[in-house]
Amino acid sequence: MTNTTAPAVGIGPFSRSDLIVLIGALVLTVGAGVTAFVPSGQVVPFVLSAGAVALLASVVGRSVDQLGDRFGPGATGVLQSALGNLPELFIALFALRAGLVTVVQAALIGSILANLLLVLGLSFVVGGLKHGVQRLDSHRARETAVLMVLSVAAMLVPSLTALMHTPAEGHETTLSVITSVVLLVLFFVGLPGSLRRHRSSDAGARPGSSDEAVVREEAESEAEGPHWPLWLALGMLVASAAGAAFVSDWFVRALEPAMATFHISEAFAGLVIVAIAGNAVENVVGIQLAAQNRAEYAFSVIINSPLQIALVLAPLLVILSTTLGLTPLTLVFPPMLVVSVALAVLLAVFITFDGESTWMEGATLLGLYALIAASFWWG
């Protein structure tokens, strides 16, 4: 899910941005490890572990992209969906082990909101101020937006049954598991189509493809960084995934004292802090693409992240929470979370079908994100 458009300047197989992220991830991971076992107050361990999670998420994404280069963009899309959300998955599992169900539910919705309001808003502001009105009128963007609406709608069905007091209201866990299985089946059913679309794009039909990896390949072809050897890409993926597992545990352990210190509710912590920690660095690419006046590519990359959350991450967490003996996670979200994500998805689709973006639209999205975040400060 990551990569950057930095020029190929660095040391050996690493670009300059690679080195910055790798060194930062190493320093913050070591710092988070030390403060996890040495008394360091309630704020420092939280800040260091949150920063380490963000940079490790970027390293995971870069490693996945480098591996995908060996197999083509179609396979890269599969790897991104399967492995790109590992840090978020680890954080959620450790939070469920600690009984922080509200944090996990808010983080799932918060990740969608962070992409559709915060990151998309920033990309519109940056692109609009630099290039004026930007065009989003592409078949690929509309296709991905519609698929996102359908996926998020399916994810919210258990919530609707509870809010409307239907006969299924007392069977939230069972319905959540059924919904999760359906979403995962939809994801796996779509994989062969992604690979076929990539093969057809090689033959000249690229404009009809909605595959995120194809989007990234086109968008980054002008400023591609150095390629990592296969052994290095595999090693970085294993190391960053292992590091993310440890740091996620430290992050969750530091989260509760930090919430008490800053008087932050579980809902706000999940909706804003956890969501941004797992997504911020890896989604910088969308803002970079908008700054390069590649608004269609930026939009497609940004909205593919919430699509993966709805189709893969959320259903996987529901199933794992029941099979691993953790605190059960259901897809029955509080009403305000349901309304917030519905607004975000509808706005993203409206902007897509409108066919253009402006910096003022971006500023409005940022304002809406700030208001939604503020409404969860007290719980």
Image (tube, rainbow, N blue to C red):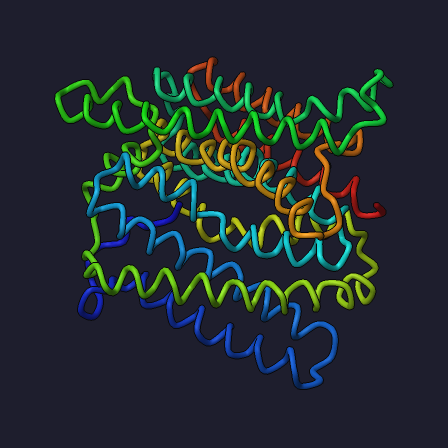
Q: How many numbered badges does the structure rendering display?
A: 0
Extreme residue toward the left, this view: 203
- Depth check: give the residue in front, 11 or 229: 229
Quarter location, residue 253: bottom right
- Depth check: give the residue in front, 209 or 118: 209
Quadrant placement of the C terminus: top right
Where is residue 367 drawn, in percent x and y?
65, 36
Instruction: Give left or right: position of 20 versus 49.
Output: left
Quarter location, residue 117: top right
Quarter location, residue 95: bottom right
- The answer to whether residue 34 is above or below residue 181 is below
Instruction: Give left or right: position of 4 versus 273.
Output: left
Where is residue 341 drawn, in percent x and y?
66, 29
- Depth check: give the residue in front, 289 or 110: 110
Where is residue 295 drawn, in percent x and y?
37, 30
Residue at 80% across / 47% down in the picture? Answer: 377
- The answer to whether residue 375 is above or below residue 38 is above
Instruction: Give left or right: position of 52 versus 42.
Output: left
Instruction: Give left or right: position of 267 versus 357.
Output: right
- The answer to whether residue 302 is above or below residue 160 is below
